[in-house]
Image (cartoon, helix red, strand yellow):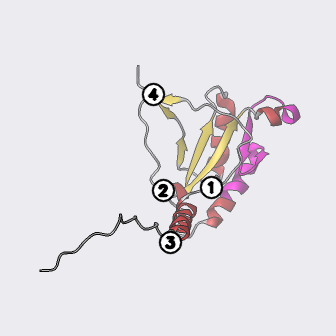
């Protein structure tokens, strides 16, 4: 039998980092694909009213948002502090809601137009007169499926 002698200490080899850039780019690509960007810049500030019974929207792609509230601090110098209606990225009057609904329905395919929901995100201190005006215009535009955004309260 032969005896093998160990000659000196063995050192651990260097870790190969050649595949590290590939892994980093795969992770970067994953986050780029799965992350959604904010579609609209908000020009109104709102604090949602609280509700005890809240349901989530099933298909957010079929939802169109109408924001109602006082202008943000940057916009308040130009537009004042009275509550405003924001459709997409600008302020509008209530009578322009019909055109907004028509353009939003045109973006959807024929089968999904019936399931389109209009979500009202209104400040909890907004007067009901503006909300009623918006609802009347939605009724004229035949957008009868309306959802009110609210934050969940504990119920006491």
Looking at the rendered structure, the secondary structure element under dot 1 is loop
| In the foreground, 7 or 136 | 7
| Residue at the image position 68 percent from the left and 38 percent from the top | 68
Q: Earlier in the sequence, mark 4 or mark 2?
A: 2
Q: Secondary structure beneath disc 2?
A: loop
Task: List the residue tagged with mark 3.
Answer: 19
Q: What whole-number distance in Å separates the C-alpha atoms at marks 3 and 4? A: 49 Å
Residue 69 placement: quadrant? top right
User: Of callouts 1 and 4, which one flags the residue occurring earlier in the amino acid sequence?
Assistant: 1
Of labels 3 and 2, earlier in sequence is 3
**Marks 4 and 3: in contact by CB < 8 Å?**
no
Circle 4 crowding by C-alpha within 10 Å: few under 14, some 14–19, many from 20: few
Q: Which residues are magenta?
A: 77-102
Whether residue 80 appears in magenta in the rendering, the answer is yes
The residue labelled by disc 4 is 153
Structural distance between the alpha carbons of marks 3 and 2 = 39 Å
Q: Secondary structure at mark 4?
A: loop
Quadrant into which the N terminus falls: bottom left
Q: Which mark is residue 59?
A: 2
């Amino acid at each position: 039998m032969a005896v093998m002698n160990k000659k000196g200490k063995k050192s651990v080899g260097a870790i190969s980092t050649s595949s590290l850039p590939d892994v980093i780019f795969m992770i970067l690509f994953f986050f780029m694909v799965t992350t959604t960007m904010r579609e609209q810049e908000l020009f109104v500030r709102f604090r949602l009213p609280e509700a005890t019974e809240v349901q989530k929207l099933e298909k957010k792609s079929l939802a169109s948002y109408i924001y109602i509230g006082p202008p943000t601090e940057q916009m308040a110098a130009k537009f004042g502090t009275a509550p405003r209606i924001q459709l997409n990225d600008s302020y509008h009057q209530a009578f322009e809601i019909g055109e907004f609904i028509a353009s939003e329905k045109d973006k959807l395919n024929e089968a999904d137009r019936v399931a389109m929901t209009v979500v009202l995100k209104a400040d909890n201190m907004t007067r009901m007169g503006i909300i009623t005006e918006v609802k009347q215009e939605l009724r004229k535009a035949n957008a009868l499926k309306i959802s009110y955004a609210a934050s969940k309260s504990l119920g006491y």
